[in-house]
Amino acid sequence: MSFLAPIFQYAYLVESIDESAEHWAQTVGAGPFFVTEHHRADTFAYKGQPVEADVSYAFAYCGEVQIQLIEQHDDTRSIYRDMFAAGDYGHHHVARLVADYEVQRDRLTGLGFELACELHANDIDAAYLDTRAVIGCYTELHSLTDRIATTFARWRSAHEEWDGSGSAIRKHVSGT
C-alpha cells in the first residue's frame, strides 16, 4: 500500500517523562527530548466529547524514528487510560504524517476503526483511531504542515548533533 505514509513515530505512555527520557537516551541513544508540559489543544474531543486529560509530551529522534513519551498527570478518561490503567505503562501508538489528513481519517473510520480522539492546535490536526484489535495499539494521523515539518527537522538535526552528554531533556512550554 504505497499510498500510505510510513510510520514515523512510536509513542509510549510513561510514569515520568524525565526519568524515561534519560533511560531512552542511555539505552538506545534517543535524544535530546523536547518537552511540552501540560499540553492544551485549541479544540479536543475524546469519544466525541470535549474532554482533555492533563498530559505532557516529550519528543526525540533515534536515528530516523521519532520517539514520543507521554505522561498523564490526572485520572481523566483518555485514550491513554483506555489502554493502560493508572500505574500501567507501555507502547501506546504509532503515528503517520499525512498531507491528506481528512482523507486518511475517513479511510480508517470507513474500515470500521473508532475515532477515539481528535484535536486541533494551531495549524495541526491529529486523530487517534482505535486499531488495537488489529495491530495492538492506536494509530495516530498527524497533519503535515510546513511548521511541523520545520519543527521535526530541527529535532532530527538536534539528535544528529547531540553527543549524548548532559541531560536528555530540553523543556519548552509552547505546543508542537
Image (cartoon, rainbow, N blue to C red):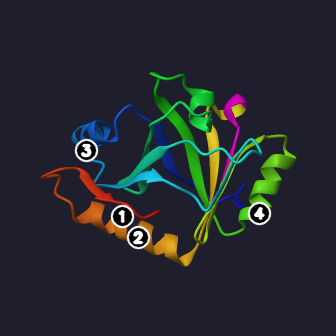
Q: Position of residue 16 (x, y in %)?
A: 34, 35
Q: Which residue is mark 3?
A: 25
Are there few (<14), some (14-19), or many (20+) residues within 10 Å of tag 3?
many
Q: Nearer the viewer, residue 79 or 32?
A: 79
Element type where label 3 sits in the image:
helix
Question: Left or right: 161 with respect to 155?
Answer: left
Tell me the SS state at disc 4: helix
As measured in the structure, the alpha-carbon distance from the residue carrying label 2 to the one carrying label 3 is 19 Å
Amino acid bearing label 3 = Ala
Residue at the spot of label 1: 156
Please state which of residues 44 and 6 is positioned toward the viewer in this rendering.
44
Q: Is residue 32 above or below residue 156?
A: above
Magenta segment boundaries in residue numbering: 127-133
Q: Secondary structure at mark 1?
A: helix
The residue sitting at 47% across, 63% down in the picture is: 175
The answer to whether 137 appears left or right of 8 in the picture is right
Q: Residue at x 23, y 50 (%)?
A: 168
Q: Looking at numbered disc 4 in the image, what kind of residue is underneath it?
A: Glu
Q: Which residue is mark 2?
A: 153
Q: Residue furthest bottom?
A: 146
